[in-house]
Every structure is written in C-alpha cells, then in structure tokens.
Amino acid sequence: MKPLPLVLLALLLTGTLHAKSKPPAPKAQTAADLAEGIAPSLVKITQIGREGADGIGSGFIVSEDGLIATNLHVIGEARRLQVEMLDGKTHEVVTIHATDAHRDLALLKINAKGLKPLPLGNSAKVRQGEGVVAMGAPEGLGFSIVQGVLSATRDIDGNAMLQVAIPIEKGNSGGPLLDMKGKVLGLLTLKHTKTDNLGFAMPVNALKELIEKPNPVPMSRWLTIGVLNPKLWKLHLGSQWTQHAGVIRAEYPGDGFGGRALCLSTQKVPGETFEVAAMVKLDDESGAAGLAFCSDGGDKHYGFYPSGGKLRLTRFDGPDVYSWSILADVPSEAYKPGEWNALRVRVEPEKITCFVNGQKAIETDDTGLRGGAVGLCKFRTTVADFRAFRLGADLTEKPIEPEVAAKFREELESHLAATSTRNETLDKLLDNPTAARRIIAEQRKQLEEEAAKLRELDRELHRRAMTKEILAELEKPEPEINLLRCTLLLSRHDNPEIEVGSYLNDFKLMIADLKDDPQIKEGTIPAVKRINRYLFEENGFHGSRGDYESRSNSYMNEVLDDREGLPISLSVLYIELASRLGVQGVFGVPLPGKFMVGFRDSPEGELKLLDVFENGKELSVEQAALMLTDSGEFAEDSLAPATKRDILLRMLRNLLGTTFDETRSIRESLPYLDLVLAIDPKAAAERLTRAQLRQRLGQKAAAREDVSWLIENFPDDGPPELIQQLDRWMQTLREE
C-alpha cells in the first residue's frame, strides 16, 4: 500500500483535529440540571432607601466584566442599587449602562470581573409549546426555578412579548426565561391579571439591541433623576416622591402610621383665608392620597383625600393612631375612581370647605389647626400621582360672563341636530311601554351622537388653540422664537394633558447645570464637547433603538422623559440648550435622510457635524455625504442652517408619515395636514393630499377650497395637462 501524500495527510489530520475541537451541540437538560448550572449567573437587585430595602427584583449576568440585565421598573429612580450574587456577596451598581422605557429593560454595571454570563438565545426562533424555565427571586426569597411552556407571542402595548404558562411573582421581574438548553429567550416582565399561571417576558433580542447601543448614566447622576427640587418641596415621613414633567409620584408606604407620608410645599400661605388645590390619581382605591394643610412641618396637619372610593377629611394631632380624628367620610358622585380628580380646600378662620371636581363634598367648623404649611399626603401602599398643585387666596374657577356663555351655547346648539320635539314625542308614547322603550333607546343613541360631536368639537377647538399658540411663537424674530416650546405645543396638540410649563422648567434645570461650567465659556468647540458629555454620557440621551417610526420619538415631552428620540428631536434639544447657554455657531442642518447639528468655531470656520442620533459623533461634511448620499455630495441648501419654522415643519412631516399606513384612520392625518398648512400655506403637496382626504371623507366643500387654491396658485410654466386634471377634479366635486 502506497503511503498517503503529505498534503492529504495534513488535511486529514487538520480535519480530525477540528472535529475533535468542535464543541458538541448543547443538549436539552432537565430543570434540575439547568438550575445547578444557571444559579451562579442569577442576581437579586435591591433598591436601597434611607431605611433600607425599598424594592426587590431579579436579574442575570450578561458579561464577565459586570453587566447585569433586568427590568427598568425593578431599579426605579433616585435610589442606590445593590446586586446580590448566589453566594451572598453584594456589589453596588456604579452605572446605569442602558435603559429602554418602552420595553421596560435596563442594563446595570458593577465593578466585578470573572463573572459567569448566561448565553443569549434567539427569541425570533422560539416555537409555540417549547419547554421553558423561569428563574428569579420571588418576594425577595432565595433563588428559585419553575418550569412551563411557551404559549404564544402576543402584542402588548406595541411590544411583541413571549406569553408563558408560568407563574410570575413579585420579585421575579427581570429574571431570565430560558429554553431547555440553558439559553436566555427573554426577561420576565408581566404577570397576567386574571390567572397566576400565566405571564409574559420581553424577548431577549430586544436586550441585544440595548447591549449594542448603550446609553450609560453614572450612578451619581442617576440619583438626581426625578428628585423633587428641595427649594420647592420638603419631605416628611419617608415614602419615595419623584417628579417628571410636572407629575409628582408617591410610591411605597411612608414611615408614619398607616403608611403616612407628607410632601410639603415651601410656598408661604397667603393669609388666614387661603385655598390649596391639586389633581390626584390613585392606582389603588383602597389606599389614600390627597392634600395636606395647616401642617406644623411634622405630624400635625389636616388631610383631605379619597379613600376607599369615598372622600375623607382627617385631623392628625400627632404621630400615632390615638391622635387621629376622622372629621368626615362621605361618598361623592363627583369623584371618579381611577381617574384624575381635582381636589380643592378652602380654609377660613372658622370653617373648612372641601371640593372634588368643582362640587362641594365636605364642610366643617373644626378649628383645631390653623396656619402652617400645605402640600400633599399619601397613605398605605397605593401609588399616587399628583399634578397642577396650586396655593392662593382664591382658586375657584371664575364664571364665564353671561353674554359670552349665551353666545357659545347658541353656537353649540346650532352645531347639534335640532331636537326640539324629542320630549314631546316621548310623552306621547309613555302610555305604551314597549314603544316608550324604543323611543328611549333612540333618544339615547341620539344623545350619544351629540356627545360624540361635542367631543370632536372639543378636540378640534384644542388643536386650533395650539395652532394659534404655535403661530404666535413663530411670528417672533428668529432669535426670539422658543423652538423647544413650539415642539412641546406640538406634543400637546395631540395630548391636552401635557403641561408645557413643567417641561420648560425641567429644561431650565438643565441650563442651570451647565451655565457656570468653564468649558461652556471657553468657546464653541469646548462647549460642544461639554454638551456632548452632558447629554449623552451623563444623562443617557440616545437615538431610538426600537420602533423608529413611533410617534413617541417625535413628541418632545416623551423625548425628555425617556431620553430617547429621532435625530431631529434630539437635535432640537441640543441646539436649544446651546442657544440658552450662549454658545455661538451651533445650528440645525437639514441633511437629506438625517437631521444633524452643525457648528463652527468662527463665522469663517470649517463646518463640522454632530450625529446626535449616535451620541454626538463628530463628522466632516464629506463623511456625512458619503454616509447619506449616492453621489457623495450634498446640495448647497442642505448645509444651510435650518430655520426654526422649517425644523418644526420637518417634525410635523415625520408625524404625518406615521399616520399613512393601514392601521390608522385617515382622520388622524388631517390635523397634521391642517397644522402644516397653517404654518406654511404654500405647501402644495400637503394641500393636494388634504383635498384628497377631505373628498374621501365626504367633506366636499372643504375639498373644493383646497382644489381652488391649487388652481389659483398653479405655476405659469406648469404642465398644461396637470391644470386640466385639477379643473376636471373641481368639476367632479361640484357635481357630487
């Protein structure tokens, strides 16, 4: 037998060696096997408050150098975080490495090496009925494991989530969901409200996006997020009070009896007679939260609040239950459980009167306490939200002048269908019960239709009011236009509950953080570097990782809340911050396909670009052109500074683009088209689109107005066949 050639022998040996070194494919294991191998990668996460643990959840290791995955709701805000390993060792979290509010995900960083990460699977390839196990620390107890099956993939609030037939308990949140080979498929997130044996997990592929594009926030900065301004509020008896965009939230019981906690305003009471008011919403009506007044700054005060669906007025004369007097506990039809309710108290020397949603609920001549501070109070375990806190001599809603009220009522009556004979018809039919019920049903339907018309009229009135405010702002000289306010008004155009002033106040705090920074005063280039660090390294602002088309990325209030947005919304924040800090030469650049921030260190200096969607990455014009164009060059007008009007129009067109799909009604597009045309009446493309939509909705007269404008403003050198098409269209609208 001839010896094998050396080359062939080498190939065979190499193949043999490769075959021997290739790891075997992972095999399915029992739950017991998995528990033994996975437990060292599990962690327990504890929020540390003044008195110790404020909340507990689960997590797992995703990198050897200390990255921990969990849910965002597990870590809360403004709290130290401690990570406990299987062996009982604890580590302080040093950085919130990444967060995603929409998907309820977070990555934490601890100073540790040589950890055992869990392998991440592919949640896009999961199969219905596949065996899975969940691991965590339920109720803060020791690490545990439970086995089940993957039931389905469901859409929950716009997120594709894994539905599992597994009980998820408090403390399991953030723990891993694994396949039977030990790979992570998701993070346990939600417990089903109707059954204990059903839960949901966020797919692990969403976590991978977070790992690839972090937005790290140092713990020192995280501890200041959402903290109430100590110049405005003083806390007593603990709880966790945070604030976002004008909404104050109280979580966890306070240290007082019954879980009592106080958040007192530093404003001075304006005399012996005064009023205090706020909007309040409870997540659990078995709890209680509302207004505190006549407080000594400690344990003595009055409280007016909903409790158990009723309204209660209480006087607290000390720290314990023996000094607690319930002055009134009454039901009220005006109170709306689970919704925002307006509470107001009027304190006079000899009387206290309490109101809910404008209606008197309680009146007492108790004079046990007077003077002192006012603020908010919370009891038991309910989570309570407060907004629109006010203090003054008289907070009653002023009546509308009779002439104005009569005029508006007449307008509304003419807007609704005539119903003058309805009651007469009903009276004639009351001697026939069957017929009467039919008439009542018909009248109810009619009233519902009228209510729907009034709701639509109210929405339209609000939108037009916002349009008027935006136009008034844009009429100012360019340097005086408050672009941030315009973008917040654009958000409020869709959501009337947004408090624009609160967000502007939050922005003022950002300015205060930087106004005395020496780098800001050194010149444009040092200032740009400092703003980059402030926004993207210290505060975690970042480009959207998930649903890029989501309207949330264009709503400036949500960009500020979630620190996530589109290139243009993040650019608005950047250039407004630079402008208010007096940094020269920073402006918006309307590049095709991606809005960026431009800057020059002098009027004649080289133009540099910042890709704020990528954490302020600096680019030359040539680099950006190669990235965004086929030719490698920009048109000259693409590099000119964008006006504030043009920036707002571009944001509006982004929002308009989110409405043109099969899932949304064409009615949602019209308000954006109306606003675009109010800002830019010469926008022919939007006017053409609006004419088409109006015709489809049967609004023929309105469609004719738009087509008439297009005909009157048709360019002299335009194609004749197009003007002929417009003429035929107008004729069709007249004939219909």
Image: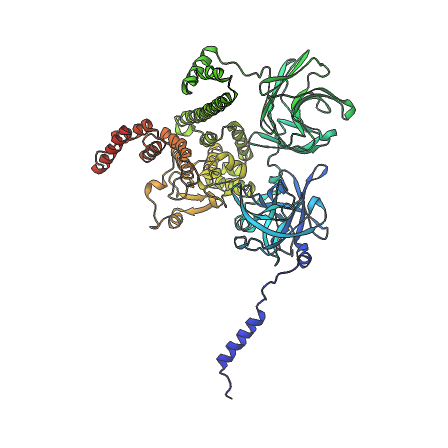
Q: Which quadrant of the figure contains the C terminus? A: top left
Q: Is residue 263 visible?
A: no
Residue 130: quadrant of the picture = bottom right
Of 88 and 619, the residue lying toward us: 88
Residue 707: give x, y in percent of width and height: 29, 31
Residue 582: give x, y in percent of width and height: 47, 33
Q: Image height check: is 633 above or below 238?
A: below
Q: Image height check: is 540 above or below 264?
A: below
What colour scheme does the image use? rainbow
Residue 371: give x, y in percent of width and height: 68, 17
Residue 227: quadrant of the picture = top right
Residue 578 lies left or right of residue 388; in this view the side is left
Going by the picture, which residue comes out furthest to the right? Answer: 322
Of 46 and 725, the residue lying toward us: 725
Residue 545: give x, y in percent of width and height: 50, 46
- Numbered-mark total: 0
Going by the picture, which residue comes out furthest to the bottom? Answer: 1
Q: Image height check: is 573 above or below 389?
A: below
Residue 589 lies left or right of residue 236; in this view the side is left
Of 677 and 267, the residue lying toward us: 677
Q: Is residue 609 visible?
A: yes
Residue 182 lies left or right of residue 545; in this view the side is right
Residue 369: quadrant of the picture = top right
Of 253 and 216, the residue lying toward us: 253
